[in-house]
Amino acid sequence: GAGVSQSPSNKVTEKGKDVELRCDPISGHTALYWYRQSLGQGLEFLIYFQGNSAPDKSGLPSDRFSAERTGGSVSTLTIQRTQQEDSAVYLCASSLAYGDGNQPQHFGDGTRLSIL
Amino acid sequence: AQSVSQHNHHVILSEAASLELGCNYSYGGTVNLFWYVQYPGQHLQLLLKYFSGDPLVKGIKGFEAEFIKSKFSFNLRKPSVQWSDTAEYFCAVNAGRGSTLGRLYFGRGTQLTVWP
């Protein structure tokens, strides 16, 4: 079946611009996660949704980062006034509703964001 | 906060050699443990997982991992590697309960290169 879909696959933008990254989870997965993968920091958690609510957004690095999820499906991660340190691969994952955190997360291919 | 350590940054082996990748985590409570693999140009894929029960778990492609609670370790093993195992391997942990239930903490990854 279809996996987690992310768009765009690549995004190059100028410093100071806003960007929107999109994630379409696996059908039926109520939990959705955003991570970012960068050379210096490895894989970092950003935010997690259960349905449309975000019980844990503590990983967002600054108030320039925000995310929403509507209809319990598609999510968008928005970065305002981008900075060069925002350059990274942004990964989305989804899973079935967790019981004890033991539902494996399924990852998309990521969006490679480059800030000039 | 939880943390995950992968001690080997880059491992180079010849085909048929045995593999062991180390993973240690810091968290005193109930944990769920995962190994993910990222083949070149592909997304992260689940290799195996441990939630409870037998501490020796078997995954895809002949990989296995052993959870040793007293050592806070979850090392990945394979008796005989193949060229196609060349990839980056990530150990990940999440808490079995609590406010950070949804998030995965990842190690920095180990790049495995297998020479034919």
Image: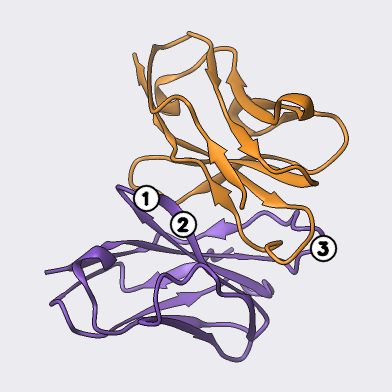
Chain colours: A purple, B orange
Q: Where does label 1 land, which residue?
A: A41
Residue B15, quarter of the rendered image = top left
The answer, for residue B91, to whether it is visible in the render is no
Question: Residue A68, how many percent across, how many down?
Answer: 51, 86
Q: CA distance from mark 2 to mark 1?
A: 7 Å
Badge 1 element = loop
Q: Amino acid at mark 1?
A: Gln
Q: Where does label 3 land, which residue?
A: A99
Q: Amino acid at mark 2?
A: Glu
Disc number placed over residue B42 in the picture, else none: none
Query: In the figure, A51 relative to A102: above or below?
Result: below
Residue B71, quarter of the rendered image = top right
Say few, some or many: other residues with alpha carbon within 10 Å of mark 2 (under 14 / 14 to 19 / 20 or more): many
Q: CA distance from mark 3 to mark 1?
A: 29 Å
Q: Which residue occupies 37% across, 50% down? A: A41
Q: Which residue occupies 19% across, 84% down? A: A17
Q: Amino acid at mark 3?
A: Gly
Q: Are marks 2 and 1 on the same chain?
A: yes
Q: Is residue B15 left or right of residue B77?
A: left
Q: Is residue B53 left or right of residue B40?
A: right
Q: Chain of mark 1?
A: A
Q: Is residue A41 left or right of residue B99?
A: left
- In depth, the one of A82 and A21 nearer the eye is A82
Question: Residue B27, how many percent across, how many down?
Answer: 70, 43
Q: Where does label 2 land, which residue?
A: A44
Q: Are marks 2 and 1 in contact (CB under 8 Å)?
A: yes
Tell us which disc is closer to us: 2 or 3. Answer: 2
Q: Are marks 3 and 1 in contact (CB under 8 Å)?
A: no
Say few, some or many: other residues with alpha carbon within 10 Å of mark 1 (under 14 / 14 to 19 / 20 or more): few
Question: Residue A59, how many percent across, how many down?
Answer: 50, 67
N-terminal-most mark, 3 or 1? 1
